[in-house]
Image (cartoon, rainbow, N blue to C red):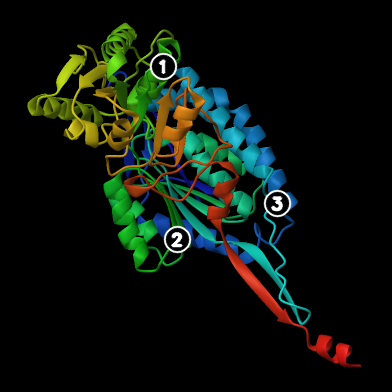
Amino acid sequence: MEHYLNYIADQWCDASRSLTVYNPGSAEPFATIALADTQDADRAMSAARACVQSGGLSAVRPAQRAGWLLEAAREIREIAESGAQVCSQENGKRLQDARDEFLEAARYFEYYAGMADKLEGASIPLGQDYLDFTQHIPYGVSVQIVPWNFPVSICARSLAPALAAGNAVVVKSPELSPLAITLLITAVIRAGFPAGAIQLLCGEGVDVGSYLVQHPEVDQIVFTGSVATGQSILRSAASRATPAVMELGGKSAAIVLPDAEITTLLPSVRSGIFFNAGQVCSALSRLLIHQSRYEEVKAAVVSLAESLVVGTADDAAAELTPLVSREQQLRVLTMIEQARAEGATVLTGGYAPDRAGYFVAPTVIEATPQMRIAQEEVFGPVLVIMPFESPQQAVEIANGTVFGLVAGIFGNNLDETLNVARQLRGGQVFVNEWFAGGIETPFGGVGLSGFGREKGQEAIYGYVHTRNIAIRLRSTTASRAQ
């Protein structure tokens, strides 16, 4: 098996311990990676701090950072194919989807390269006796904890704007899928960033992750993951009032209005809940259907789920791939059984196919709004459907969880869809296409879905703070008096 390393203080480093990474499609060991400890974390943080103090990223002309980012994008595209092979094997996703992760990562670097030299301050009028202006200042050392479901693209989503703004970054990769990120970082460092700008650690969250977010050298935290872990990080961050960007998941609903077109809806259901085996924080996990269309849409959704081809990353025909781990598979199956016990109806799926790997069959469950399966994030290929009688009732159901990440509406009447969209609680609302938008559109949530924004122009301002400089001009009053 191939063995992967960490990147600390401008060197690829081994460790005394290693972590075995499994192929979710076969449940067989795939590779190993050096398992970092807190001493490695100290070295990484020291190197990042040295980069900040040297001004290697922040003191240069911003156009230089733009150049590094563009070169990084080019290098990422060069290794996209080999990186996709590793990503699909460690994560279980289709090869094309893994390839798309690397291409998306390249786009993040290209996009934020275009913003590196546009972080402009403002001149504030205070009268003839003053000169006042603002500056956007990088925080310094950004600790970024990356999740396992889209490790490459989510790593780039935070890494690119942080570097564009002039921060040094310490990335903590996910234990379940840490390998492809090493290829991403290999490509990025080839772009010529200054010493210490980028560090990569694979360490256990309870050990290295906890240590990093409490480290005296951390200036900012970026986290994508579970609510419980995010809350733990925020408690640690509170002691030093460390600013953070938090993306903590969701239980997102799509509302099907009476005039919705079934041919428009079904492709969004397919990608919204069954893409990446439902392991998407913004998944379409609840489908609220107007009573007049309920039986029709229910039958179509069940038929769609039953038509999906279950297969591994190596199977070009696969439409539903495995979950990332045995633990995640058991968690999803347990939640389905809990739903049955509460009285929900499993219309299709709800079981593990008889094959190697960590699969769960495409599942559709009929439930009521207050059941746990309709309130808690499953993070698997499980769609909950429910009827509603009026748009207001649909809005109440959609908003009736502790989350507020994304939502969607399907219908042909623009006035009605826009009216519903304005009432939905969340950071992003899709109309007639789930996952509409792209890296140009801000992404993030409210409530237990977190705070702060990734993607789009808005995101880069989460990696800087504003400094105001006010100057009293001594000569102005005297000059007027003469």
Q: Nearer the viewer, residue 180 or 388?
A: 388
Q: Which element type, helix, strand or loop, lies under badge 3?
A: loop
Q: Earlier in the sequence, mark 3 or mark 2?
A: 3
Q: Amino acid at mark 1?
A: Asp
Name which residue type carries label 3. Answer: Lys
Q: Quadrant of the N terminus?
A: top left
User: Where residue 118 is drawn, which disc sits there?
Assistant: 3
Camera-near label (1 vs 2) is 1
Mark 2 neighbour density, 10 Å: few (under 14) some (14–19) many (20 or more): many
Q: Position of residue 156 (x, y in %)?
A: 53, 40
Instruction: Name the kind of residue labelled 2 in the image.
Output: Pro
Q: Which mark is residue 243?
A: 2
Q: CA distance from mark 3 to mark 2?
A: 23 Å
Element assignment for label 1: loop
Mark 1–mark 2 distance (CA, rounded to whole Å): 45 Å
Quadrant in which the C terminus is drawn:
bottom right
Q: Residue at x 27, y 39 (%)?
A: 400
Residues marked 3 and 1 touching at CB (< 8 Å): no
Residue 268 in percent (x, y) is at: 42, 19
Instruction: Mark 3 or mark 1: name the one nearer the start of the chain.
Output: 3
Residue in the foreground of this view, choosing between 134 and 108 = 134
Query: What is the x, y in percent for residue 146?
Result: 42, 43
Classed neighbour count for the residue bearing mark 1: other residues with Cα under 10 Å, few (<14), some (14–19), many (≥20): few
The residue lying at 71 percent from left, 76 percent from top is: 126
What residue appears at the point 26 percent right and 48 percent down from the top-left corner? 228
Q: Mark 1 sits on what residue?
A: 259
The correct choice, above or below, for 191 with respect to 239 in the image is: above
